[in-house]
Amino acid sequence: MNNGGLLISALFLFVIAFFKIIKRVLFQKRLDKEDEDLIYRKFKYYRNLKERKQRQFSRRVREFIKKKNFEGRKNLEVTNEMKLQISATAIMLTFGYEKDYLMSGLETFIIYPEEFYSNNTKTYNKGETNMEGIVVFSWKDFTEGFKDERDNINLGFHELAHAFILESKYKEPFKEFFDENYEHLGKMMVDGDIVEKARELNFFREYAYTNKMEFIACAVETFFESPENFKKELPELYHVIAGMLNQDNNKKIIEEVDII
Ligand SMILES: [Zn+2]
C-alpha cells in the first residue's frame, strides 16, 4: 500500500473511532449515581473493576434495563432495585463480549415473590428459562443467592447461564468463544474424568449432574462465587468456563479486554 492508501486507511479508522465515541457519549449513558451506588454495594465483581470498566459496566446495565421487559406476578411490584440486580447479573455473564452483550434473544423477566408453579414442568420452581426468551425468577431465591457469595448457589447466575447458552447456540457473536469450549466440555464429560473428579471433591450440588446444561449452569455459579478455589481444584473445567464467557474471573482479564 502506498502512502496515500495508508493515509486514507488511517483517516477511515479515525472517523470510525470518532463516531464510536460520539455514539457512546450521546446514547450510552451511565446509570444515575444512586443506582451505581447500589450496584457498588451489592456486587463485589463491580467493586473489583477499574474505574473505566465500572463506567462501561454501568452503561451496559442501563442499556440492558431499557431493552428488557420486567413483569411482576402474584401482586409483586417490580422495583428499580430488582431491575438493577437482575441486569447487573446478566451483564457480569457477558462482560467479556464485545457484541450482543445484551443477549438480544432474551426479552422478558417474569418475577414471582417466591417459588411458583410452572406449567412447563408441572412442578414448583425457583427459576426457569425458556426458548422464547423468557427468564422466570422467584425473587426470594434470587436475593438468597447473593446473601452468601461463597456458597456456589446463585439462582441469578444459574438461570442467566441457561439464557446465555441458548443465546450462544443461535447467535453469531457469542459463537466466537463459545462453540469450541462447549464442544471441548462435551468431550471432557464423555471421555475424561471431570464429572467423577467434581463429584469426588463434592464440588457441585447433586443437581449439576442432571445433564450438560445443568452442569454448565452450576459451574457458572461457582465460577463467579469461588473462582480461586474452582481454578485450584478443577483447573481444566475452570478454563473451559472462562473461555466460554471470555473472561477469567481470577486473573481479571476482563480489565484488559478493550471493548466499548
Ligand atoms: Zn438449571
Image (spheres, rainbow, N blue to C red):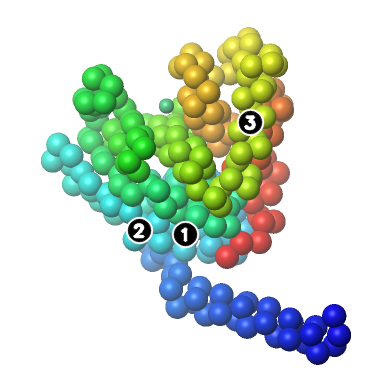
Q: Which residue is mark 3?
A: 183
Q: Residue furthest left?
A: 75
The reply to whether discs 1 and 3 touch (Cβ–Cβ < 8 Å) is no
Ligand 1: image quarter? top left
| Residue at horizontal 56 percent and vertical 47 percent from the top | 174
Q: Mark 3, residues whose alpha carbon is within 10 Å: few (<14), some, or many (≥20)?
A: few
* Sequence-earlier tag: 1 or 2: 1
Q: Is residue 130 left or right of residue 167?
A: left
The label shown at residue 109 is none
On the image, numbered disc 2 is attached to which residue?
67
Tell me the SS state at disc 3: helix
Q: Amino acid at mark 3?
A: Glu
Quarter where residue 11 is shown: bottom right
Q: Residue at 54% x, 19% y: name it.
A: 204
- Who is closer to the viewer here, 37 or 186? 186
In which quadrant is the C terminus drawn? bottom right
Mark 1 secondary-structure assignment: helix
* Residue displayed at 38% across by 66% down: 32
For label 1, the residue is 60
Which one is in front in this view, the residue at disc 1 or the one at disc 2? 2
Q: Position of residue 30 (x, y in %)?
A: 44, 67
